Amino acid sequence: MTIPEFKKHWTSLGIGMVWLFILLWPLLGIKPEGLEVASTFNVWWRIALGCSFLLFLYQLNKAGAFKFISRPAGAVAGSMKSATSMVPMAVWFVIGIACTALIPQFAGRYAQDVAINCMIYVCLGLGLNIVVGLAGMLDLGYIAFYGIGAYTYALLSVQFQLSFWICLPISAGMAGLGAWLIGYCSMRMRGDYLAIVTLGFAEICRMVLNNWMSLTNGPNGVTGIKAPGLYWFDFTNGMTLEHIWLKKLSLIYYVILILVVFTIIAVYRLQHSRIGRAWEAIREDETAAEVMGVPTFYMKLLAYCSGACFGGMAGAFYAARMRFVSPESFTFLESAMVLSMVVLGGMGSIPGVILGALALIALPEIFREFELYRMLVFGGVMTLMMLFRPQGMLPSKRTMRSGKD
Amino acid sequence: MCIGMTNMAELHLHDVSVRFGGLQALAEVNFSLMPGEIVGLIGPNGAGKTTVFNVITGVYNASGGDVEYDGASLQGLKPYQVLAKGIARTFQNIRLFQNMTALENVMVAQHSRTGCGILGAIFRTPSQKLEEEQIKERAMEELRFAELEDFADEVASSLPYGHQRRLEIARALASDPTTILLDEPAAGLNPAESSELMETICKISERGINVLMVEHDMKVVMGICQRLVVLDHGVMIAKGNPEEIQKNPAVIEAYLGS
Ligand SMILES: Nc1ncnc2c1ncn2[C@@H]1O[C@H](COP(=O)(O)OP(=O)(O)O)[C@@H](O)[C@H]1O
Ligand SMILES: [Mg+2]
């Protein structure tokens, strides 16, 4: 560590802290009695001290003061890594599913609720991962397909009393159809332009749901949606086949678990097929892919539609689980959330997306007391991630290299 | 000189012209690539050689004239349709799928020769599995041909430059072409590598694939091409066998004058 570098770090920390104080003061200092400095200063000096300490540690580390710990730690981590990579991915997958399947046996209602929420987002994340991670298209309106799926099941269930299991493929199909319509018009666009179009489409969807009173009941939402049903053997008087509603949380938990398993397997298989390779080729170099025989327009449309189908499926489950849907569940913020999971976890990597969903859904629940600061921390974490690990927490092997565009 | 088995596909360019705004990149270019031939397309920088490739493969549309392959016009076809007709190409500045492995790069090129759909992939139907195995087998064959089988699982961007050039050729060959267009395949290679490349090109020709190549390295061009076509500022100024071309005053003028 050179002296100028040392100086540079501390000056930028100083400037950052002054800036933080200026930001913090209007937030904390404005009281009915007038401006006040003490409370702001109280918070600020703690943050400043913490940051200074972290910078100090960072510089010590750069200077090599922690070699005596990091060397053996690195060796341990390395051997752990080789040990875990000996076990094939499929085994980890089965272990993970088994553990998840056991959660309702131990955990209470609240934990189950959070877990269900997590799993819905895992489905959404994996679906969006096809579009963003594999085919490399930026989609800011993914939540629209979740909404289409949810409303499809909601309306079919309320109006026609159709069963959840019949509606599940219909919801996926409707979401896919929506994606086909919007994709057919916009797939010729690339990058930012596509992002804007998808964003606009999602807003249009939400507006339609919000204003088409006769069909969707507008902002009041649709109520009276049926839970999934199931035929089950009943042993009370002999053995009869009884129809039961899966209303209990621990039962509906297994429905989403099955959906998650299906989604993971489907996305994994797609990724390792001729179709998935074509998508990745498009992500890497669209012109070269086209010249090597990939019909890029059609394949991009296919990516967009199949991603939407998984979203639609998750949406149908959401409607069945809440037994109520309203347009406000499908805002841009949700799209941004799902996209963050994919980016944070690692684009194109299935374990990464799962981890991303866990991090963004479960962690805020654990730190419920600090709910006020959630967005602050979220923004901070995202910024730090993009600075230090742009490829995500668990990047797929091949996207290790940071993107060139 | 290499002589080998041949296919019957002929490539003809009839008065092909290309304009980019005010720039006439190609003006009524006429030449043919006959079965079994290795033809060199040469000319100074900016002469329009890459543009010829782009027109043939459907990346650009010709503003006049017609490209005919195997008896049918290629006019208006998309690049992937041209590949399906049997014309594969490489790029002047290597365009591999950087973050995919060498094997996957080659496997992608089989896309137009295979047909398994999305449901087949999700449910891993027996026919999908069989097809997947065939794709892999075929890709490994091409990697072996390019002597890259040891690098099958390496990410393309991590390969040395010479290997990347060979991988691009392997990828083009994996699409089972009848004609291959090579855009400056020897650019950036050392003398040992370029003589290896000459052998590879001869082997490609022996497999019955017609070769059209753009190349600046005169040793390579004179060594393996049976005929040459010379472009200058988008105009075809000469064609003929290498000895004639070397003596042609218009060609000497174009190279020295530029
Ligand atoms: N997409 C394009 N837009 C505008 N001009 C182009 C384009 N592609 C090539 N050109 C121009 O066409 C001419 C021929 O280029 P090119 O075919 O790449 O030459 P080379 O013989 O070196 O391969 C050059 O003057 C180049 O600037
Ligand atoms: Mg060129």
Image (cartoon, coloured by chain):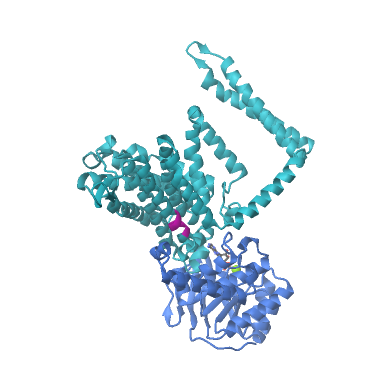
Instruction: Name the chief secondary structure element in magenta.
Output: helix
- The magenta span reads A264-268
Left or right side of A95 for B242 = right
Q: Which chain is blue?
A: B
Left or right side of B94 for A10 = right
Residue at image point 29% right, 44% down: A227
Quarter, ligand 1: bottom right
Q: Image height check: is A162 above or below B113?
A: above
Quarter of the picture holding the C terminus of chain B: bottom right
Q: Image height check: is A176 above or below B108?
A: above
Q: Image height check: is A24 above or below B126?
A: above
**Is residue B122 shown to the viewer in this render?**
yes
Q: Which chain is cyan?
A: A
Q: In the image shown, does B43 or A387 lie closer to the viewer?
A: A387
Which image quadrant is residue A86 in?
Answer: bottom right
Quarter of the picture holding the N terminus of chain B: bottom right
Residue at image point 54% right, 33% down: A377
Q: Image height check: is A244 above or below B154?
A: above
